[in-house]
Amino acid sequence: MGCVVADLKVRFAGLELRNPFLLASGIWGESGDSLAGAWAAGAGGVVTKSIGSLPRAGYPNPTIETYERWGMLNAMGLPNPGIEEYPREIEVAQRAGATIVGSVFAGDAAEFARLATQMARTGVSAVELNLSCPHAEGFGTEVGGTPEDVEEIVRAVAGAVKIPVIAKITPNTSDPAALAQAAERAGAAAVSAINTLRAIAIDVHLRRPVLSHGIGGLSGAAIKPVGLACVWQIFEKVKIPVIGIGGIMTAEDALQYVMAGARAVEVGTAVAFEGVGVFGRLARELSSLVDDLGYARLEDAVGVAHRSA
Amino acid sequence: MGCVVADLKVRFAGLELRNPFLLASGIWGESGDSLAGAWAAGAGGVVTKSIGSLPRAGYPNPTIETYERWGMLNAMGLPNPGIEEYPREIEVAQRAGATIVGSVFAGDAAEFARLATQMARTGVSAVELNLSCPHAEGFGTEVGGTPEDVEEIVRAVAGAVKIPVIAKITPNTSDPAALAQAAERAGAAAVSAINTLRAIAIDVHLRRPVLSHGIGGLSGAAIKPVGLACVWQIFEKVKIPVIGIGGIMTAEDALQYVMAGARAVEVGTAVAFEGVGVFGRLARELSSLVDDLGYARLEDAVGVAHRSA
Amino acid sequence: MRTVVRVTERVEETPSTVTLRFPFEPAAAPGQFVMAWFPGDDELPMSLSYTTGPSKGITVKAMGDTSRRVQAIRPGSPIGVRGPYGNRFDLTPRHILVVGGGSGAAVLAPAAEAARLGGSSVVVALGATRAPELLFRDRFERMGARVEVATDDGSVGVHGFVTLVADRLLENERFDAVWTCGPEVMMRKVVDAAASRDVPVYCSMERHMKCSLGMCDACALGPFHVCTDGPVFSSELLARVPDFGRFHRDPSGRRVPF
Amino acid sequence: MRTVVRVTERVEETPSTVTLRFPFEPAAAPGQFVMAWFPGDDELPMSLSYTTGPSKGITVKAMGDTSRRVQAIRPGSPIGVRGPYGNRFDLTPRHILVVGGGSGAAVLAPAAEAARLGGSSVVVALGATRAPELLFRDRFERMGARVEVATDDGSVGVHGFVTLVADRLLENERFDAVWTCGPEVMMRKVVDAAASRDVPVYCSMERHMKCSLGMCDACALGPFHVCTDGPVFSSELLARVPDFGRFHRDPSGRRVPF
Ligand SMILES: Cc1cc2nc3c(=O)[nH]c(=O)nc-3n(C[C@H](O)[C@H](O)[C@H](O)COP(=O)(O)OP(=O)(O)OC[C@H]3O[C@@H](n4cnc5c(N)ncnc54)[C@H](O)[C@@H]3O)c2cc1C
Ligand SMILES: Cc1cc2nc3c(=O)[nH]c(=O)nc-3n(C[C@H](O)[C@H](O)[C@H](O)COP(=O)(O)OP(=O)(O)OC[C@H]3O[C@@H](n4cnc5c(N)ncnc54)[C@H](O)[C@@H]3O)c2cc1C
Ligand SMILES: Cc1cc2nc3c(=O)[nH]c(=O)nc-3n(C[C@H](O)[C@H](O)[C@H](O)COP(=O)(O)O)c2cc1C
Ligand SMILES: Cc1cc2nc3c(=O)[nH]c(=O)nc-3n(C[C@H](O)[C@H](O)[C@H](O)COP(=O)(O)O)c2cc1C
Ligand code: FES
Ligand code: FES
């Protein structure tokens, strides 16, 4: 690395991140040691695995399929230790000094509010609502897939907690911006997009779906153009900050999200393909790239691609 | 090739195709010579470019972006010679003996019915309704993105023409099966899925979207898992045949669609990456593969993956 | 697959023609083209007028709105480049007649250069509206080609179309091949003239282009696509194409007679 | 990245252990594992008990429901295999003590074979509930390793845990390294015994696995992931892991004490 000068700090929704790269929910986030590890590797912050009211084992294996380096399919089934057990994991990450966003999932608005309240009590910096898992029966898009659902859930949570509420919305919709607008109306401090795309893998030799759950969610490079479009469309319709997610593998990918309107990004599948060292590399490379392009601060690039469009 | 014995013929919705591989709409389909060329290369049938009431130049360049070998983004903007000019192109393909499906797009149900009627007059074997272009202002998903829209349009067309009506539906929806059910209710002979996924590409050096239209549609291998999930979900909800589309590059991809419930498939982006010779290769390889798996006829494999799920 | 590069050099070749040079690593061969995107403006197919080394070039003639704006591009400006695309001139013929009209010399010059380097002899019939518009005349001479010119206004060389020059050369000399690029009606005449003398002609064809990947059908030329089967077509192949010299297609795919 | 293969051979190694052989081309090293999918049933991490050549193998002990059903799999049945994953045993130590309990010998046998091929000497402390359950005893002997056994019921060898044998061997001989695989409480004892004698121990660890790609966090072991940082961990690293020998995590990520 040559001289790295560009300022990658981002401030939004009451959060201050040392760089825009958050560990995405569901990756390395079930245990406190792993959250701490992602932070130590250079993540700007970490989002926990989505936590529910009760412990869940998730779906049986197979839960994962990969497509070369460009895609991954998963149906984990929201495994998590449950909100009673989880605070001890958060504590481990807190001792390591990590900036933590607590992710929760629930079956209705009241349960979301209850969970978010418990999550807030652990001292996390913000709470992210998983309104968007495409393969969890009774959760995810099944309860948070319409603007009405999003509005009701976010309103309940925003009324219950003092920390910023981030609504994580689905790309499996005709109008992602409408979901973001609903979240904004209901008091969300930010929206994050996208979760995985509803997808499936079939094995022709075995004549069956590969994943035990059948339907899963597609992540990785393949979904970057889709995530970018969601962020692009959301940015044009809401004033609250947007967190971009989907297929970020390089600093350039991240900057594409920023120029489309994101203030921060989350990184998931890249951790599987490259290891957690990806966070250090992304931060270094983004700093150079932002500098090369003549920006003093990353924040100056937020949404700039809209000006020429 | 060793001995190729499996029967690839497919019969559905009044169509009989020599093999299940149709040329997808928008690829090689603006001129009659190209339609004839795809047929000569071994396609089981050809779908025309989507034709509208008037000639359209489409969007200015750039209209295309590619992602290595796994994806492509386009916003052509539905260029087409218009329904008055187009019959002479169909005639060229007819003289070559091609089985032809005429694709049309329109701004409302009445225009769809008018266009389909004109298309039917050319003698095509079926008409495919483009209810699903994600980047055409006033067309595509903007008029055919909800079950109500689909039902109204398909009903108008099915009442106006005698040839089979195929409704091509969008993946940019929370519930693709609901769109297919609407098409079935309204008298569609088949549904085809999927069209491209709404997506965008940003160039960070130029700080702008790459395509002149900004938003485009993602196709190619990247969308195969999504297309398969749409076909899977549609197959569980409708009785009419399904045509699978999205990212088919190999015979195995095609067979995945068939096992998920498709009776035929359309191939688009593979033509750009491999050339039109892809049709001959796919048919040869699928015949062997189907044979290896112990099926006498491809049709015996339709939907089999649902039995084990 | 699109690279954003900065223009390093701008050369006014003729009053209506400008060459832009830029760093672009991928290997290219004479005859090939790139899709050149002028940000905020159109993306256009442009033959590479400089094909060797890491610094490539395109030579743009002022035709319509975009190409006129392109001419104003200064060194340092970014352009998007993808490619190179298409096939190439076959360099094996030993005695070659090059027939260029208008901006056609842009693609013919690097091809002739490569042929000369390979030891072939090259005669160039070069046409333009008027003397200062003769593109790459010096470049052809520097490479050791014999150049014979024609101008519409007779300001230099033969008064009239370059096909007059080509006809005369074909009558007096035995060429192994003819390479031509220019208005299609001109190329059609060259093909007809050479046919009667049994000399194969290779035409660098133009059609409206969008994808340049052999997919969108915009550049259809009979059963071919100019972007992937061409842009260089032999007279033998063109004999099977009724479109040749008769009609092209506008961006909507409608047939437009020449 | 998942290959569907057909089982070519099924060997009943002990009353509760079955080896399945199958064609699988990717190169593998002793210590590595695959994710083996038994269609219609679970996908489980399984050490490769045969790592060389195109025919690989896994050796499955009847533990719970799935592994019991797996044992019924016949030659010709399809299984899905992805991998190999994880790190490998370092083969440089010259005098190695191998301590295997239960199905642990599955991963230790190919490692010991490779070490013997490399010229190292190997002593094996092998434990089981009863004599017929001693896994790969013949295989260890055939490769020229000295084998000392322990059984819970005393039917053969030392009556009691294999750690008794290991302790005695560590006391009487100077080993360059100890390799062990078996119940974690056993491995913890081996590590403690070797620590006092300053011999490094390499443990093949097990945790619940889902992705095996270092992503889902199911296999978290302190700051490590068994699937990508392991499964082989040195006693030096394990000293930094409070979980070791104390708790693992169930499929929901909850801590479960041993
Ligand atoms: C393979 C190929 C190589 C070419 N090489 C050169 C070259 O080296 N130098 C050069 O000056 N020109 C070249 N052209 C022509 C060039 O692409 C443009 O057609 C020309 O610059 C006019 O563009 P315009 O937008 O200014 O004109 P417009 O006013 O838009 O139109 C003038 C003409 O240009 C054509 N045109 C516009 N857009 C395109 C397009 N996307 N593809 C093809 N034709 C188009 C129109 O059909 C019209 O006939 C080449 C074309 C092709 C197909
Ligand atoms: C790296 C590694 C290598 C292994 N190698 C072998 C081997 O060579 N031979 C062998 O017989 N066993 C091996 N195992 C253990 C094996 O994966 C299973 O745990 C065991 O077969 C029991 O499975 P079951 O479903 O029958 O038992 P269950 O009744 O489901 O459970 C019994 C135990 O198996 C564990 N288990 C179930 N699923 C998994 C899973 N996905 N990942 C890890 N543990 C699981 C449970 O935690 C439980 O403690 C290995 C495990 C790991 C992590
Ligand atoms: C294995 C896996 C597990 C995931 N679990 C969750 C989860 O629990 N909650 C959630 O909101 N998103 C979850 N996601 C979605 C990611 O957070 C992210 O939105 C998505 O993977 C796209 O980003 P990527 O392409 O960088 O992976 C999961 C993704 C993967 C691959
Ligand atoms: C360049 C291009 C143009 C397209 N034009 C049309 C069109 O006119 N009408 C239509 O229904 N679909 C159109 N499509 C969508 C394809 O028919 C197909 O649904 C999609 O590309 C997915 O298939 P693929 O991955 O095999 O390309 C177009 C796709 C591409 C790439
Ligand atoms: S430009 Fe699209 S096919 Fe040639
Ligand atoms: S099994 Fe998923 S991280 Fe190891």
Image: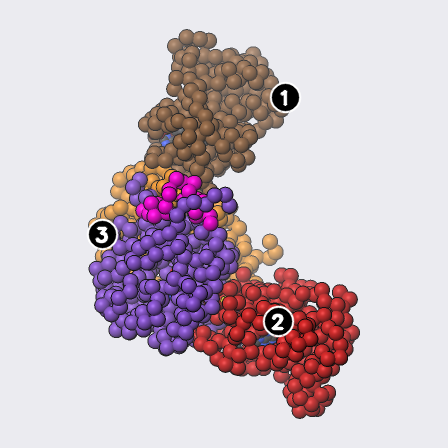
Chain colours: A orange, B purple, C red, D brown
Classify residue C191 as left or right of residue B44: right
Give amino acid for label 2: Ser
Classify residue A261 as left or right of residue B304: right
Residue at 58 percent across and 71 percent down: it is C238
| Neighbourhood count class around disc 1 (C-alpha, 10 Å): few under 14, some 14–19, many 20 upward | some
Q: B110 or A156, which lies in front?
A: B110
Q: D182 or A209, which lies in front?
A: A209
Residues rendered magenta in the picture? B284-303
What SS does tag 1 mark? loop
Give amino acid for label 1: Gly
Q: Which mark is residue C235?
A: 2
Residue bearing the label numbered 1: D119
Q: Position of residue B270 (x, y in %)?
A: 47, 57
Q: CA distance from mark 3 to mark 1?
A: 66 Å
Residue bearing the label numbered 3: A109
Classify residue B151 as left or right of residue A256: left
Q: Is residue C129 visible?
A: yes
Mark 1 belongs to chain: D
